[in-house]
Image: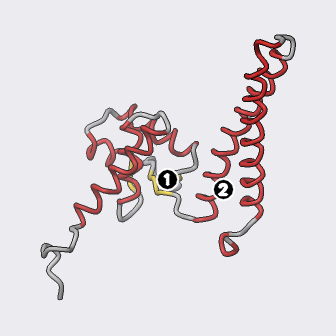
Amino acid sequence: MCDENAEGYASLQDVTKHIVDACIQWARIKGYRASTGFLMGLTVVAKESISLDELVLETGYSKSTVSSNMNLLENLRLVRRIVTPGDKRHLYAPITDPEIIRTNMLDAIDKEIQLFIMVLDRTENTMLSGGAETRFLLERIASLKQSYEQVKKTIDFLRKQSLSQI
């Protein structure tokens, strides 16, 4: 039997901290509050579905903060709310299905790409009347659009593949 405290073995607490910290970093990168990442992390490491009240107790956040963050995570399709008939509690569980995670990630990237292509198109159309002084920007925009469109094709290709094919 292995001694979990022996050198080279991580405790459950250490692993939990790594996962929660990674979720906090994810939230910050995406422009969300650290509380969003912290709650996501707690949902991921919970052995079973976790209730709103348990999350409030665990974090010390107000019920409204936890509720709004969990609604955000649910809208992002990162957690699912479990409703049991006759039970007023809201339980939350992380989404762990690889196909759903893959789709979520591809959708997020696709939205970003669509936004940039739209803005670049609009900017290019505005600049066409700008003359020689804007020519370098038109070339840069064309290059950026080509890059984004190539990434979009890659995303579209990946979307058509099953995980077993990748």
Local crowd at mark 1 within 10 Å, few (<14), some, or many (≥20)?
Answer: few
Residue sitting farthest toward the bottom = 1
- The amino acid type of the residue labelled 1 equals Gly
The C terminus sits in image quarter: bottom right
The N terminus sits in image quarter: bottom left
Q: Residue at x 77, y 59 (%)?
A: 157
Q: Position of residue 76 (x, y in %)?
A: 57, 44
**Which sits in the foreground, 59 or 111?**
111
Q: CA distance from mark 1 to mark 2?
A: 33 Å
**Which sits in the foreground, 66 or 82?**
66
- Count numbered badges in the picture: 2
Q: In the picture provided, is 92 more to the left or to the right than 163? A: left
In the rendered image, the vertical position of residue 148 relative to residue 97, given as above or below: above
Q: Residue at x 51, y 55 (%)?
A: 82
Contact, CB < 8 Å: mark 1 with mark 2?
A: no
Q: Quadrant of residue 49?
A: bottom left
Local crowd at mark 2 within 10 Å, few (<14), some, or many (≥20)?
Answer: some
Q: Mark 1 or mark 2, which is nearer to you?
A: 2
Judging by the rendered image, the residue that carries numbered circle 2 is 103
In the rendered image, the vertical position of residue 15 relative to residue 125, given as above or below: below
- The amino acid type of the residue labelled 2 equals Thr
Q: Position of residue 93 (x, y in %)?
A: 46, 57
Q: Position of residue 122 (x, y in %)?
A: 80, 22
Q: Residue at x 33, y 46 (%)?
A: 55
Judging by the rendered image, the residue that carries numbered circle 1 is 86
SS under mark 2: helix
Q: In the picture provided, is 126 more to the left or to the right than 14? A: right
Q: In the picture provided, is 87 more to the left or to the right than 12? A: right
Q: In the picture provided, is 29 more to the left or to the right than 18? A: right
- For marks 1 and 2, the one nearer the N-term is 1
Q: Residue at x 72, y 60 (%)?
A: 158
